Image (cartoon, helix red, strand yellow):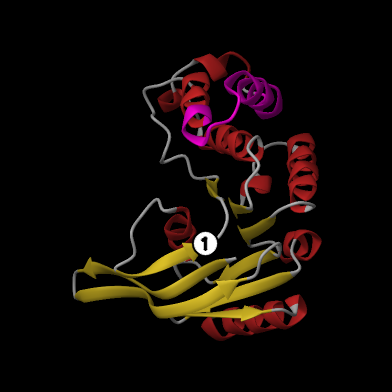
Amino acid sequence: MIRLDGISMRFPARRGWKVLFEDVSLTFPTGRAVALLGRNGAGKSTLLQILAGSIEPTRGRVLSDGTISWPVGFAGSFNKNMTGAQNIRFVARVYGVDTGELLAFVEEFACLGPHFHMPVRSYSSGMKSRLTFGASMGIRFDTYLVDEVTAVGDAAFKRRSAELFRARLAESGAIMVSHSMRQVRELCDSAAVLEGGTLTYYGDLDEAIDRHERNMARAA
């Protein structure tokens, strides 16, 4: 279970404040694969970072009775001057998992070749996403946070990513941002729609997608 308790997020802007969401309280059920839907700029990626503890909300708190991954596809928590392998060793120590096992898993899965032993600052955005995806999937979390990661790479890597993600979902929950409704239908069983600073949870995935698509059509 992950509960948002009165979460608000705002940033200073040229004219006052930009409010992403205000006083959001919502519970993500245990073991569900939840799609996080919303228009560009609605604050989906920011919300994932708040859930992960990467950034602090302006107000409110996140409560959880399980472990939560960092946002897959977001490499901001990795040291860009360290190699991919060095970063994985650090992650393993932080989360208390076997260093050798995690190194072997990420190196084999991410397919970075010699770049795995090069500084992360030399990586492309896709390479960073592969590294973060491999690191996250290599550790068993109760809830995985995913930000479009299976859209990265060639067709073979996309298939491997989706297959591994499905395997993890057999034992864990997830909160996933995706602009592909086909991918959402394949991987998720419920959704939350972020619109106008309000976050609404839908146990019925089709109802959530319908609401999201109507919001998108209205904006267009």
> Residue type at mark 1?
Ser
Q: Position of residue 151 (x, y in %)?
A: 67, 47
Give the quarter of the figure containing the C terminus.
bottom right
In terms of depth relative to the viewer, which is nearer, 107 or 143? Answer: 143
Q: Is residue 24 left or right of residue 206?
A: left
Determine the residue positioned at 57% across, 22% down: 99
Q: Label 1: few (<14), some or many (≥20) within 10 Å?
A: some
Q: Position of residue 22 (x, y in %)?
A: 37, 79
The part of the image, by quadrant, that contains residue 20 is bottom left
In terms of depth relative to the viewer, which is nearer, 210 or 218? Answer: 210
On the question of residue 177 being in view, the answer is no
On the question of residue 183 being in view, the answer is yes
Determine the residue positioned at 78% across, 49% down: 166
Q: Is residue 106 above or below residue 59?
A: above
Can you identify the residue that label 1 sits on? Answer: 64
Q: Position of residue 24 (x, y in %)?
A: 44, 78
The span picked out in magenta is 92-111
Give the quarter of the figure containing the N terminus.
bottom right
